[in-house]
């Protein structure tokens, strides 16, 4: 088992290199391995007779940084005898090869010692004159994820090696920031070559040269510029419900808000039917508002928070999609539904008293009929062919007519309900959506009647001035004009 000693070269000039590290490198007998020769200290030490062997060629042989670091680590581990390995900055700061060497040590493959060099962060804080205690984040620009960023903090991105990485960083930041938001490019912080340039974000990859000593600093972003992020919505809803907030929001309960959730859901569906993307955004926002209000009421009452709501649905989606998040294989969408129902039953634990218990009684009547029939069909209570279903429709219509002839209103309502239930069953057998079908007819009626109103206004002013026969003519005319759009 060979021993690998890792030393940090600091952030910039030889003057920044700790004396102990400097002596250890000079006194080392043999070749010193360096992750890269592209560092000011390397050139100074070469002038003093230190021999280096670098892994710069590995960068050219790999398309991804992950492959570079793994290859460097593999070569170091396979060296015979003791190895001195030097890296830029501090070994424990943004140095993936050192983390891989630690994993090898923990696996018993090597012996490892690590000694620090000055971190470039110290010099960066001084150059920018910022105090990280106010809130600080540090990211590798080669491995970005916007979900992890909290841009109300001081934020530094290291390893902005070249224009391509700078461009990718810019595009990631533009998901949250405006093109004119100021960012600061810091190169060789703390050295005599230190350079600090502030530019609009959109200029990050255009007008400034970057190298392996370059970092990018993003100052804290005012919260009102982050209204697109979830935490801001949560803060707004919490403030509305808090003392000094909105009297209307403060007095709401789960019960008082019920109708709004239903209304907003239908308004979103209306936007979908119109294929109106802008309105979909607005209506989905209104649906989300209702979710947030209910969640805040739950938090105010001490029963649950929106975090629990999110955790619940996230866990559920993972559990019920084992074909995505586990090793289960499915052949088609029908198998997905079958697995979903089976997993759902396991989650519920005890078997429900009725197969219909999972169909909410608050569903719209037509949708509820469809759901009830599907549940019954799952246990075999269903016709295999559609012909008996059509006969049932005729039977229910006949029974309605019989009640109508007797002028029995209550019986007529019952029989008409049976007729509608049978009609919904026909739609289900043909895999039609009853609710959507009726909605299309409603829309068609709206379009035609609106066309009639316009035609009447152009002539005499109002539909009320027309006879039934004349209204029928307007209807036929509207039907012809709108046939292609319906």
Image (cartoon, grey):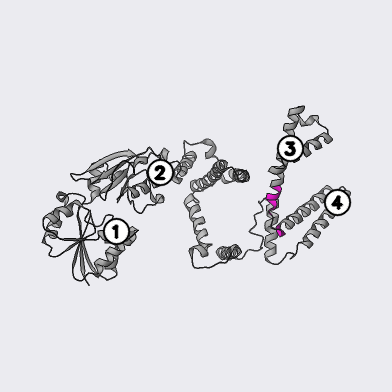
Between the C-alphas of marks 3 and 4, the distance is 29 Å
Earlier-in-chain disc, 4 versus 2: 2
Lower position in the chain sequence, tag 1 or tag 3: 1
The secondary structure that dominates the magenta segment is: helix
> Magenta residues, as a range?
428-438
Q: Earlier in the sequence, mark 1 or mark 4?
A: 1
Residue in view at x 57 percent, y 46 percent = 254
- Judged by depth in the image, the label closer to the viewer, 1 or 3, is 1
Residue furthest to the right in view is 405
Labels 4, 2: front one: 2
Residue nearer the viewer, 60 or 142: 60
Give the residue at mark 2: 174
* Secondary-structure class at tag 4: helix
Disc 2 and disc 3: Cα gap in Å? 47 Å
Q: Is residue 213 left or right of residue 246?
A: left
Give the image location of residue 104, x and y in percent.
28, 67
Give the image quarter of residue 341: bottom right
Kindly report the distance in space between the C-alpha atoms of the residues bearing marks 4 and 2. 66 Å
Residue beneath disc 1: 59
Disc 1 from disc 3: Cα separation: 70 Å
* Label 3 residue SS: helix
Q: Is residue 248 above or below residue 33?
A: above
Q: Image check: 249 left or right of 385?
A: left
Q: Circle 2 sits in a helix, a strand or a loop, which is it?
A: loop
Q: Position of residue 28 (x, y in %)?
A: 13, 63
The residue identified by callout 3 is 449
């Amino acid at each position: 088992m060979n021993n690998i000693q890792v030393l940090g070269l600091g952030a910039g000039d030889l003057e920044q290199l700790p004396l102990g590290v400097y002596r250890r490198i000079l006194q080392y007998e043999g070749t010193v391995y360096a992750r890269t020769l592209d560092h000011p200290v390397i050139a100074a030490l070469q002038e003093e007779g230190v021999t280096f062997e670098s892994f710069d060629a590995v960068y050219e042989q790999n398309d991804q940084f992950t492959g570079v670091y793994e290859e460097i680590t593999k070569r170091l581990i396979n060296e015979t005898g003791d190895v001195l390995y030097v890296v830029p900055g501090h070994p424990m700061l943004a140095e993936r090869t050192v983390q891989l060497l630690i994993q090898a040590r923990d696996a018993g493959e090597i012996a490892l010692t690590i000694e620090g060099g000055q971190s470039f962060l110290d010099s960066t804080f001084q150059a920018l004159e910022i105090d990280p205690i106010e809130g600080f984040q540090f990211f590798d620009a080669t491995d970005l994820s916007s979900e992890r960023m909290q841009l109300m903090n001081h934020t530094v991105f290291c390893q902005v090696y070249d224009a391509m990485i700078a461009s990718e960083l810019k595009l990631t930041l533009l998901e949250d920031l405006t093109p004119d938001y100021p960012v600061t490019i810091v190169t060789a912080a703390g050295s005599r070559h230190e350079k600090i340039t502030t530019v609009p974000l959109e200029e990050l990859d255009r007008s400034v040269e970057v190298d392996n000593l370059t970092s990018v600093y993003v100052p804290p972003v005012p919260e009102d510029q982050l209204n697109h992020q979830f935490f801001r919505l949560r803060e707004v809803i919490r403030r509305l419900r808090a003392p000094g907030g909105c009297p209307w929001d403060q007095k709401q309960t789960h019960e008082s808000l019920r109708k709004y959730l239903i209304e907003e859901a239908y308004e979103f569906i209306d936007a979908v039917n119109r294929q109106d993307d802008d309105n979909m955004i607005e209506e989905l926002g209104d649906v989300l508002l209702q979710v947030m209000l209910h969640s805040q009421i739950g938090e105010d009452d001490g029963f649950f928070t929106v975090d629990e709501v999110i955790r619940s649905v996230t866990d559920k989606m993972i559990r019920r999609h084992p074909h995505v998040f586990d090793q289960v294989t499915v052949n088609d969408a029908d198998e997905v539904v079958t697995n979903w129902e089976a997993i759902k039953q396991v989650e519920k634990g005890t078997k429900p008293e009725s197969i219909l218990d999972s169909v909410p009684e608050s569903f719209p009547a037509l949708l509820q009929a469809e759901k009830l029939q599907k549940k019954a069909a799952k246990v075999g209570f269903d016709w295999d062919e559609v012909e008996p279903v059509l006969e049932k429709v005729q039977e229910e219509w006949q029974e309605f007519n019989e009640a109508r002839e007797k002028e029995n209103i209550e019986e007529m309502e019952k029989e008409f309900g049976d007729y509608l239930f049978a009609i919904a069953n026909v739609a289900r057998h043909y895999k039609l959506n009853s609710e959507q079908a009726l909605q299309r007819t409603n829309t068609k009626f709206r379009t035609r009647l609106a066309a009639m109103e316009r035609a009447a206004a152009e002539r005499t002013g109002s539909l009320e001035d027309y006879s039934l026969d004349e209204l029928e003519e307007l209807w036929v005319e509207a039907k012809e004009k709108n046939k292609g759009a319906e």
